[in-house]
Image (spheres, helix red, strand yellow):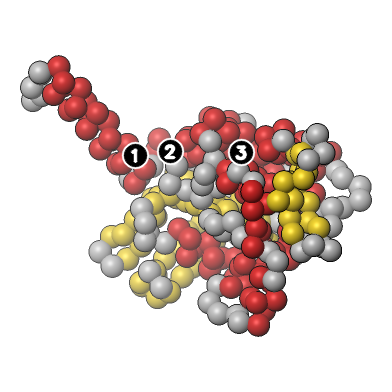
Amino acid sequence: MANAITRVEIKDYLVFEGKFAADFCTGVNVLIGGNGSGKTILMKYMYSRYQTAHSVYIPEKDILEHAKGLLTFIEQKQTGFSDVYKDVLVAAMDVPTREQTKAQKSIGQKISDVIGGTVVWEQSEGTFYTVRTDGRRIPFSNEASGFKKLGYLGLLVAGGQLSHGAVLFWDEPENSLNPELVPVLVDVLLELSRNGVQIFVATHSYDVSRWFELNKKSSDALRYFSLRKEGDRVVADVADDYVSLPNSAIEDAGDTLLRRVTEAAAENAGVKLK
């Protein structure tokens, strides 16, 4: 893919002390790691540094419900990473492409089935709504938190923002999403990657990490990056499948929980563990 980010090199940038480098695949790249390991910073760095014709960043927190007047405020008081949030709003306000491709229709339908409708931008009111399949209009401020990001993704797909050659950065897509919907989310992202969209996902979710591996096809490009601190430096363990990662903050937390559950069960049963 011509616009794909295949390698990044960072030196002395925020938490990345010294040199850091990583080689990415053209499909889905999953970034995991503990808080402060640099996942979000890495994605924001790439987003600002390697702008493509269609480069989209979905932040952890939804801002569409605050759209009214926010774009003007950001443009007048631009600081730090506010460009990300300005770009989010501008992309969301784009009009749907007239002739939807087969991929756009397929992905749009999957998202619509999950959230029970489609998200629309009412320019005259400066507000986003979810239009339910029965015609009801739900202000985005009243929409279920787990549906907001999926709805925004649907807007990006319908507007052609995520077409062949685009790069999508998504910070914690699992945020507020019911675990039973994670496989659907993963399927949507894999379908986007099959249609030429390079994807970067930062996640703390074991479910998200494993569903990518379980739902991928043999032809799908998938790579995992486990970011961690080694002294003052950030390093990344890399593997093309989750189970091959030598270090994983997600796995460590799961092991700790399993150990505590086992201890609690033993205590309740009056059994002493060795």
At 59% across and 38% down in the image, what residue appears?
A: 186
The image quarter containing residue 115 is: top right
Mark 3 crowdedness (10 Å alpha carbons): few <14, some 14-19, many ≥20: many
Q: SS at mark 2?
A: helix
Residue position marked by numbered label 1 in the rendering: 251
* Left or right of 270 on screen, residue 88: right
- The x, y position of residue 77, in whole percent, is 60, 82
Residue placed under numbered mark 2 in the picture: 206
Circles 1 and 2: CB atoms closer than 8 Å = yes
- SS at badge 1: helix
Secondary structure of the residue carrying numbered label 3: helix
Q: In this rendering, would 158 be left or right of 139?
A: right
Q: Position of residue 161 (x, y in %)?
A: 75, 56
Q: Residue at x 45, y 58 (%)?
A: 39
Residue position marked by numbered label 3 in the rendering: 185
The residue depicted at 62 percent of the width and 67 percent of the height is 85
Inter-mark Cα distance, 3 to 1 = 21 Å
Residue 127 sits in quarter: bottom right
- Looking at the image, which residue is at 36% across and 72% down? 18
**Label 1, label 2: how far apart the Cα atoms are:** 8 Å
User: At label 2, which amino acid type do we have?
Assistant: Tyr
Near-viewer residue (232 or 126):
126
Picture coordinates of residue 61, whole percent (x, y): 54, 57
- Is 24 on the left or on the right of 196, as rendered? left
